[in-house]
Amino acid sequence: MTVKALGALAANKPMESLEITRRAVGAHDVAIKIAFCGVCHSDLHMVRDEWGGAIYPSVPGHEIVGHVTAVGDHVSKFKVGDTVGVGCMVDSCRECASCHDGLEQYCTGGMTQTYNSPTADAPGHTLGGYSQSIVVDENFVLRVTHDEKDLAAVAPLLCAGITTWSPLRHWNAGPGKKVGIVGIGGLGHMGVKLAAALGAHTVAFTTSESKREAALALGAHEVIVSKNEEEMAAHAGSFDFILNTVAATHNLDPFIGLLARDGTMCLVGAPEHPHPSPTVFNLIFGRRSIAGSLIGGIAETQEMLDFCGEHGITSDIEMIAANQIEDAFARMLKGDVRYRFVIDSATLAG
Ligand code: NAP
Ligand code: ZN
Ligand code: ZN
């Protein structure tokens, strides 16, 4: 089937309207008419080939929500009309230890990402959710239980939500824990909402003075403008866990100094260029750790969606039409988004 999509033909070319094909619905497949797709900073890194290895045409988008329009003969989990989501993965080897543990994102056989991964489908690499529809194996489709009216604001949970949920859960963010979230963008604003909902004492770190009040409204108990050394110093040695979502290269030392003994700072932001090496003494004194985390597995994504459904948690979004994507990218680079752009997929037709 031929469908309209939004993508780039080269790293230095702007996004444009494209026609792509979707495979016929196989026995285990679910066909989804996409209603909305979130705009993740990873989409921008990828279409501009900031990480290397981008394949063109590049159609990004891995915060997908929509409705099932067809199911294969062997599909048991979904039926036509269901409201569903697709995140950053559409397949994995299903045999390695990580797949068995429900952590398909660490598949040693190599997971198939929603875009830019090798596939048997034309044109030989996966094409993401900036498109009218997608066909995905039922094991990589998520169930959405939120109210239909909230659907657009659910889309960002499929990446920004799970990428913050997984490390928050892994490092036991909850009552009695002091948790920091660095960078209040798409990921960070979800990190604040989720850490607070999990019961942690939640502190937002922002470089933007203008986000101080806004971060409190998201549920942060305290906000620190990270450029302000006095504010930072007042929290020295006090954090159990810090989740760093910043999309740009920066000095990690000021944050490591805020960790308590045995505290961890987990990096999820994936900037184009490496951070400067942190000072080893900041780690040795206090047995502190720096870690990383990649999105989240399918089971924990469903757990996060169900938790958000029960607690009425969605993303704060700004809806855009397909032809506003370049402006949205430019604004995202300036940190000028509260807090996630979401494409109204109906506008892809125009
Ligand atoms: P985003 O919406 O652009 O948010 C990033 C935030 O970082 C900005 O809002 C800003 O917050 C802060 N920031 C930006 N530039 C900065 C700078 N020069 N110095 C300090 N702070 C700066 O991006 P996103 O969609 O949340 O994604 C964040 C990063 O995570 C990207 O690199 C993305 O590729 C990566 N990512 C990783 C995974 C994973 O699995 N690990 C998954 C998804 C995304 P303030 O204004 O509050 O300072
Ligand atoms: Zn993403
Ligand atoms: Zn595997």
Image (tube, rainbow, N blue to C red):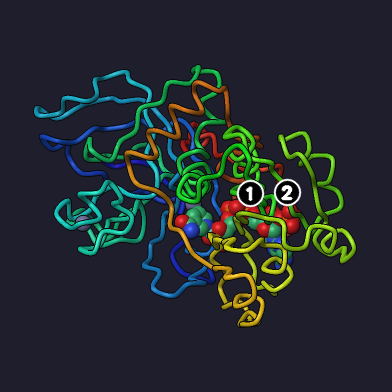
Q: Does the residue labelled 1 lie within 8 Å of ligand 1?
A: yes
Residue 260: percent from the left, percent from the top? 66, 61
Q: Name the amino acid, label 2.
A: Ala
State yes or no: Cβ of the residue under disc 2 lies below 8 Å from any atom of ligand 1. yes
Residue at 36% of width from left, 48% of height from top? 19
Up the image or down, 134 lies above or below 328; here it is: above
Determine the CA span between mark 1 and mark 2: 8 Å
Visible residue check, residue 331? no
Give the image quadrant in which the ligand numbered 1 is located: bottom right
Vertical side of 165 occupied by 42: above or below: below
| Mark 2 Cα shell of 10 Å, populated few (<14), some (14-19), many (≥20) | many
Q: Is residue 250 above or below residue 46?
A: below
Q: In the figure, is residue 240 to the left or right of 101?
A: right
Position in image of residue 222 (x %, y %): 79, 44
Q: Is residue 26 left or right of residue 271?
A: left
Front in this rendered view, residue 131 or 150 = 150
Q: Would residue 69 be seen by someone viewing this image from the given angle?
A: yes
Q: What mark, if any, has residue 188 been given in the picture? A: 1
Left or right of residue 85: residue 329: right
Report if the CB atoms under discs 1 and 2 are less than 8 Å apart.
yes
Looking at the picture, which amino acid does disc 1 mark? Gly
Mark 1 or mark 2: name the one nearer the start of the chain: 1
Above or below, 244 relative to 145: below
Q: In which quarter of the image is residue 329?
A: bottom right
Residue that mark 2 sits on: 204
